[in-house]
């Protein structure tokens, strides 16, 4: 948003837009992502995958109390009820 305001305050032509400093990409030095050495396997029996098996995933850290879902991405079980009941 601030970049658009800066352009409104100091408009330049489209031919020179590539040189407009506020719109320049800021390059970051990316560090390689290291995988977990001992991931936790989180399995939820009442949330089934397409094969009808309990849904499982791995995380670096502890498993959420309940399966993360829409309106409850952290798996706190505080989100609204699902049509088939609570996630466990």
Image (cartoon, grey):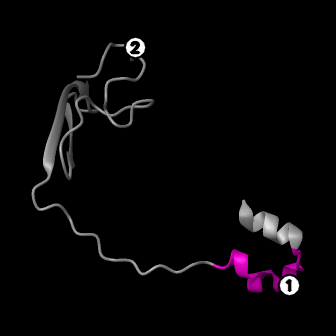
Q: Residue at x 75, y 86 (%)?
A: 19
Quarter occupied by the N terminus: bottom right
* Front one among 21 and 86: 21
Quarter occupied by the C terminus: top left
Rendered image: mark on residue 7: none
Q: Residue at x 80, y 70 (%)?
A: 6
Is residue 14 highlighted in magenta? yes
Other residues around mark 1 within 10 Å, as few (<14) / some (14–19) / many (≥20): few
Other residues around mark 2 within 10 Å, as few (<14) / some (14–19) / many (≥20): few
* Type of secondary structure dominating the magenta stretch: helix
* Front one among 4 and 15: 4
Residue that badge 1 annotates: 15
Compared with 75, 28 (above or below) is below
Rendered image: mark on residue 83: 2
Which segment is the magenta one?
10-24
Compared with 2, 23 (above or below) is below
Q: Is residue 21 left or right of residue 81?
A: right
Question: Helix or strand or loop: what does disc 1 sit on?
Answer: helix
Percent position of residue 41, x then y:
14, 44
Number of dots carrying numbers = 2
Compared with 79, 50 (above or below) is below
Q: CA distance from mark 2 to mark 1?
A: 55 Å
Q: Residue at x 80, y 80 (%)?
A: 17
Is residue 17 highlighted in magenta? yes
Assess whether mark 1 and mark 2 are in contact (beta carbons under 8 angstroms): no
* Front one among 18 and 62: 62
Q: Is residue 58 left or right of residue 75?
A: left
Percent position of residue 31, x then y:
33, 77
Question: Helix or strand or loop: what does disc 2 sit on?
Answer: loop
Percent position of residue 36, x then y:
17, 61
State the image quarter where residue 24 is shown.
bottom right
Query: Counting residues from the N terminus, which is met first, the one under dot 2 or under dot 1?
Result: 1
């Amino acid at each position: 948003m601030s970049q658009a305001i800066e352009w409104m305050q100091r408009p330049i032509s489209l031919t020179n837009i590539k040189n407009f400093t506020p719109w320049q990409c800021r390059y970051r030095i990316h560090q390689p992502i290291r995988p977990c050495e001992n991931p936790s396997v989180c399995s939820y029996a009442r949330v089934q995958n397409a094969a009808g098996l309990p849904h499982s995933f791995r995380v670096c850290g502890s498993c959420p109390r309940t399966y993360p879902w829409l309106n409850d991405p952290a798996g706190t079980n505080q989100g609204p009820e699902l049509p088939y009941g609570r996630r466990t």
